[in-house]
Image (spheres, grey):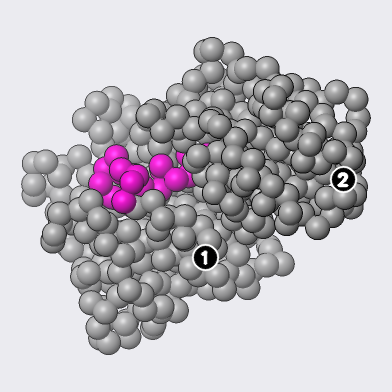
Amino acid sequence: MDVNWDQISTIIEKLTDRDEYQGIGLLNFNNSETDQWKQLLPDAEHVVLQLDHAAENITWESLYPEWIDEEEEFEVPNCPSLPSLQVPGKPRIDLIAVKLPCNKQGKWSRDVARLHFQLAAARLAASSKGIRPVHVLFMTDCFPIPNLFTCKDLVARQGNAWLYTPNLHRLREKIQLPVGSCELSAPLQAKEYFHSERAGREAYATILHSAHVYVCGAITAAQSIRMSGSTRDLVILVDDSIGDYHRGGLEAAGWKIYTIQRIRNPKAEPEAYNEWNYSKFRLWQLTDYDKIIFIDADLLILRNIDFLFEMPEISAIGNNATLFNSGVMVIEPSNCTFQILMDHINEIKSYNGGDQGYLNEIFTWWHRIPKHMNFLKHFWEGDEEEKKQMKTQLFGADPPILYVIHYLGNKPWLCFRDYDCNWNVDILQEF
């Protein structure tokens, strides 16, 4: 990309402490661009940062494999190693400037080099030992990773120039995470009944819109959360289709009700099942909370999962290919993240036409939690008999082994108490 120096100059003017800068770290700028930086900030030392390319065999699929051996039965999952940033000398760096690639003709958000540059900048910023803030400036035609450099930390934007003053404590926590979903970010046997000093700013949330068919599921989900021992707030987003009768049941179950305006999926057909599922983006407007564990209304919490509040946005189980399943996910509400989601609904195409596909295009840097924390009730056609027996044992274990069971197909509250009506339909028998 061509660097727009007018945009950078405007951004630099917003740095009130720029006259005190000792070092400017420059990553992925050519010689003439480096000279231009020296003219912009002539009194600072300009440090050209060196970053070797990742090995050719490191692909997005190797960073985000479809499956890893979570139980470590055959191998210990291990992420590929990305080269570290080389910083000549030991200068104090006050501003890290990075030119990010953005190939809009390809899968720009799943570009290993693009991720590598941003992680390198994050690690350099997090290594700062002083009390002065460190600024990070990205020049890019595409938005930076929104859950690495959050828009809460975005202090200025001018065209393709994005200026952040990251919270270094939170950034240090993030760079300790695996580089991709190639390793678990949360242990398989997690610490239950996690105590947090921020418990009042944490909540479970779900959403109901367009029809009341999932009300019984939401009531049961709330009961299961309370039976697991959690005392966190329960928040449910509903639209006008959920009437007073059903709202009364939800409130009695413990849900705090927030009424929302639905968000239409512009790529959905009228009256289609996915027409209003972008309403889930409203979760990011729950800014009374710092962390939300979103749960679909068709699942049961079998064991306490409060420990997931320790996890960053987006933490979820794997779904297929390089993607996550949004049925259980950790998010961090923010109005500016909500705006990012809204700004791109006309250009980004969801792989499945729904909110899960769209969120996977925005949050490509996600963190894998064990599948026991969102275990899909599904007997795959290709499952061997031994695997089917294992799943049957997991579903019926007492005390439970699974943390969360996620019901697919016909939902339990639409069936009989002692009979799974998925058996009544051939194509649903796998559920």
Mark 1 packing: few (<14 Cα in 10 Å), some, or many (20+)? Answer: some
The residue lying at 30 percent from left, 69 percent from top is 262
User: Which kind of residue does numbered mark 1 sit on?
Assistant: Asn
Q: Is residue 381 above or below residue 155?
A: above
The quadrant where residue 153 appears: bottom right
- Where does residue 149 sit, x and y in percent of width and height? 62, 47
Task: Identify which residue, 88 or 166, lies in the foreground.
Answer: 88
Left or right relative to 191: residue 134: right
Residue sitting nearer the eye, 420 or 32: 32
Element at label 2? loop
The residue carrying mark 2 is 21
> If you read the primary sequence from the N terminus, does the residue marked by circle 2 or circle 1 appear first?
2
Let me know if residue 88 is in the magenta part: no
User: Does the rendering let one see residue 398?
Assistant: no
Q: Residue furthest top?
A: 56
Which residue is at the front of the view, 185 or 267?
267
The residue at which mark 1 appears reads as 335
Q: Is residue 82 above or below residue 162?
A: above
| Range drawn in magenta | 346-368
Task: State the image coordinates of residue 120 (x, y, percent, origin top left).
Answer: 69, 32
Q: Is 347 contained in the magenta span? A: yes
